[in-house]
Amino acid sequence: MIRAALFLFTVLWGNAAFASCGPVIFDDARFTACRVDLTTDDLRLFLRDGQGDILGSFSRVQSSLPEGQSLGIAMNAGMFHPDRRPVGLYVEHGAQEMRLITSDGPGNFGLLPNGVFCMAEDRAHVMESLAFEAAGLNCRFASQSGPMLVIDGAIHPRFIATSDSLNIRNGVGVSPDGKTVWLAISDEPVNFHHFARFFRDHLETPNALFFDGRVSRLYAPDIGRADLGFPVGPIIGTVVDAGGAGG
């Protein structure tokens, strides 16, 4: 069964025309990971529709796209307030909706160090929030969340390998050259340490960021997946044209 899952994962990735998702088993837990090639795939963040209302669902993101374009893959992309506004930094098409938050606080977002996913001109970054502030990057899209999962190859210092805090979790990691973005979700409850090791040791991302837990969901129609749930805040996804290539 493990061989079958890994084989399917390889086959799905064989088509480089658009982002692909597939199952993988890592340390006896099931995950789904999606590989986004920024040289060919059109990856964006989504929050509001043309009237300023928060989209909140994959179906509403789909309906907001122009005729001839569709949502390829997507997942929730950061923590949000009860009214679904982003908790931390949020940038869409170069316009900042929410400022960077660098103070600690309650909950996972305040479990420092937290971080920022940023899509700049020619590559993506996942950076610890203070390092991001110092770098002064100009992001076309950005979402702050927390905690960081992997920081320059190291697991977040406050994660415990034997922790019994288990949840469905999703997050993002970036390849060393910044050209490949990995979106991943656990398909069963795992702790932070396990999830972080999946990014570092299996996906080989030197930096990775936690997006959320419990509300985590994935849209990947190519593998027959469209997770449902109550509305969320920021959403990350690829846009494809009618022919199936990046928009």
Image (spheres, rainbow, N blue to C red):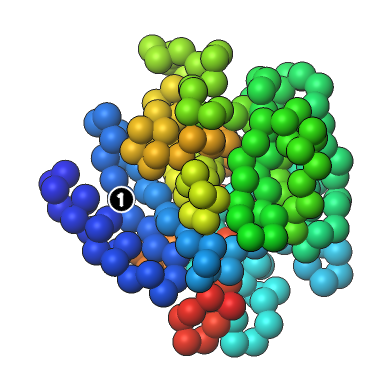
Q: Position of residue 83 (x, y in %)?
A: 80, 45
Q: Is residue 126 visible?
A: yes
- Exactly how many numbered labels are in the figure? 1
Helix, strand or loop status at disc 1? strand
Q: Position of residue 16 (x, y in %)?
A: 38, 70
Q: Quadrant of the C terminus?
A: bottom right
The location of residue 131, given as percent across then percent down, is 72, 31
Direction from residue 171 to residue 189 in the image, left or right: left
Of residues 157 and 63, the one drawn nearer to the viewer in this rendering: 157
Image: 132 above or below 65: above
52 relative to 128, above or below: below
From where the camera sits, is residue 149 visible?
no
The residue under label 1 is which amino acid type? Answer: Pro
Note whether 48 is above or below 112 in the view shown.
Answer: below
**Taking 165 as reference, is 145 left or right?**
right
Choose top left, top right, bottom left or bottom right for residue 99. Answer: top right
Residue at x 45% of width, y 43% of height: 185
**Front in this rendered view, residue 55 or 98:** 98
Q: Quadrant of residue 190?
A: top left
Q: Residue at x 54, y 63 (%)?
A: 38
- Residue name at image x 28 percent, y 35 percent: 26
Q: Which residue is mark 1?
A: 23
- Residue 112: percent from left, percent from top: 68, 20
How packed is label 1: few (under 14 Cα within 10 Å), some, or many (20 or more)? many
Left or right: where 39 falls relative to 234? left
- Horizontally, residue 5 falls left or right of residue 206, namely left
